[in-house]
Amino acid sequence: MPRVHEKVSYWMLVLPALSIMVCFYILPVLGIWEIAFTEPETGVGNFVKMAGSNAVKTSFVITFRVAAITTVGCLILGYIVAYAISNFATRLTPLMVALVILPFWVSVLIRSFSWIVLLGRSGLVNDALIHAGMIERPLRLMHNELGVLIAMIHVMLPFAVLPMLTNMRGISGIYVQAARSLGASEWTSFRQVYFPQTLPGVLSGALLVFVLSLGFFVTPALLGGGRVLMISEYITYQIQEFLNWGLGSALSVALLVATALVLLISARFVNLRATLLERK
Amino acid sequence: MNEPILSIKNAVKRYGSVNALDGVNLDVAEGEFLTLLGPSGSGKTTLLSAIAGFIALDEGTLALRATDITGKPPEHRDFGMVFQGYALFPTMTVRENVGFPLKIRKRPPAEIKKRVSEALEMVQMSDFADRMPSQLSGGQQQRIALARAMSFDPQILLLDEPLSALDKKLRADLQWELKDLHQKLGVTFIYVTHDQDEALSMSDRIVILKDGAIQQEGDPNTLYDQPRNRFVADFLGKSNFLEAAVIAGNGPAYQCDSKGALFTLNTQEPCRTGETITLALRPERLRLGLPGAELVSATVKQVSYLGERCQVLVMREGGEELLISRPTWKTDIVPTPGLQVSIGWDADAPVVLAPA
Ligand SMILES: Nc1ncnc2c1ncn2[C@@H]1O[C@H](COP(=O)(O)OP(=O)(O)OP(=O)(O)O)[C@@H](O)[C@H]1O
Ligand SMILES: [Mg+2]
């Protein structure tokens, strides 16, 4: 009897969130799948068109390239931050962790606009460099892939730091001590003993950043200035400018499938449950 | 002592206002089994870490065979270390773990292979070479940690409470194995424990630490029979403490008075007539007699049977509690709570302690 009761209260607790997900997420997504296969006429016409379009192909290439470079950048910077926080215990440690999380409190929109102020033709960076006499004419720091990457890495950095930090804080310092007592130098201990233990955190961070970057819209749209068309912005164009609902929806389906594939493939290397659900 | 393999001079380590090491001087002889024994926070791990090179001393020097190694990084000291938590590398197999120090030293693969199997055989773990550490029990992990620390023939083996995480039975087995290994290999062991029985049963020499300072050092027998101060007498085994006034005598026999109980004391320690001394008496050196038959009258408070021995707690008339340990087979008196008895001891049983 109590088991049945437990089940009922379980579903009662889950139901509100579940119904919101179904009404406002699952059903619309299904709607998009429907549009993709029915507009303007029933069939796979949209997908054929998509496969034949060079613009779409370019957009996909840019999307994956930006996501990949963002991931690598975030991993390198994030690894250093996470390593420093977890291996040099000082009174400042809680503050450092807070600084990693702090950007979450500021909207992505505002953070992206701030980068425009910094990187624009007469932005702070160019002004400073010109005043310092290091350059004569402003550098092109935005409205190109460089600008998108700088801002994307900034926006995504916490998503790389947090899983790595969790992972590294769980690694006892005694392994490196043991390695050194056995004759390994500091660098060898890091490479052969410490680094392999951080790989789960690195892979979690990589997956999180890569998947989020694939569908990211705000930052590439603002800093790319229409010149770095990532797939989500391309979709917006199709729907808002050309009212091409069929192709737009087909692209959404393609992005969704691509993302699902990335998750599926990485599931062979990463413990997805631990990565996405059970982060402490 | 021949030239010591390791010589520690005036080692001081401070953490804020705490002196984790407070001027430690210690010579370790080649091939000996030396145990650092002390309560929690006494500085055992700190001393071992300083020897291993993980922490830098604030003052003092370390020398290995008369060569100064005070500032030498741990990887160049060539000391094997076994940690309390084993510290097996979780991403490597047992074989890779044991071969790690050899690989670091760039030994040829054939030699590594041979020495890894030898080391695993030594700890009877040959069948587990391809497992991951997480697939081993605590005792098995400890054996691997030992094999790893020994595989490169270290100058000294440092062990920080290696058995404390194991259950009692396994701990006893491994104590024998460790002692066996030590005899077979002849390597110098520096062993940290807070378990006095472990220290007594395994060591050639015990160093007792408290608050970062050495209280006494010596072989187990001497430490047990001749504790220098109250801390040692109480920490290593159990002791009863008696205050007594010296009323006559000039070495080695003195007449003493402890609250009206007059007795003779035989000791090498010089005592002055009129001074008050503190005596330590081991429970097994106390005799239980019928009322009036011995020196001090007392009442039995509690009795606990421990198999081959039984412990009797008595309350001395107008004074302190005394603990007596006697073989269970002695049935001349059957102690029960409330029984009137008397307590006695031989003239050479009490140990004179240094004034606190
Ligand atoms: N990194 C540190 N920072 C501050 N204080 C420390 C540090 N390491 C040790 N101490 C202090 O130094 C003293 C000795 O510590 P140590 O770890 O050597 O004790 P121990 O004898 O090994 O104790 P245990 O049996 O509990 O392991 C303790 O008072 C401890 O609090
Ligand atoms: Mg310790």
Image (cartoon, coloured by chain):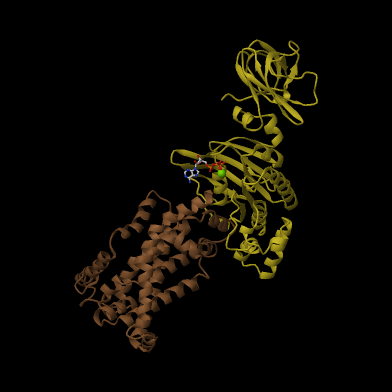
Chain colours: A brown, B yellow
Q: Is residue B309 above or below residue A188?
A: above
Q: Residue at x 29, y 70 (%)?
A: A218
> Count of labels shown?
0
Residue A105 in sight from this viewpoint: yes
Residue A158 appears at what percent x and percent y?
37, 62
Residue B35 appears at what percent x and percent y?
65, 42
Q: Quadrant of residue B147?
A: bottom right
Q: Is residue A231 above or below residue B172?
A: below
Residue B27 appears at what percent x and percent y?
62, 43
Looking at the image, which is closer to me, B129 or B337? B337
Q: Quadrant of the N terminus of chain B?
A: top right
Image position of A243 (left or right of B66): left
Residue sitting farthest toward the bottom: A52
Q: Quadrant of residue A228?
A: bottom left
Residue sitting farthest toward the front: A1
Looking at the image, which is closer to me, A223 or B190? A223
Q: Quadrant of residue B135?
A: bottom right
Residue A199 appears at what percent x and percent y?
50, 65
Q: Residue at x 80, y 26 (%)?
A: B329
Which quadrant of the frame does ligand 2 lie within?
top right
Residue B249 in sight from this viewpoint: no
Looking at the image, which is closer to me, A41 or B46? A41
Q: Quadrant of the C terminus of chain B?
A: top right
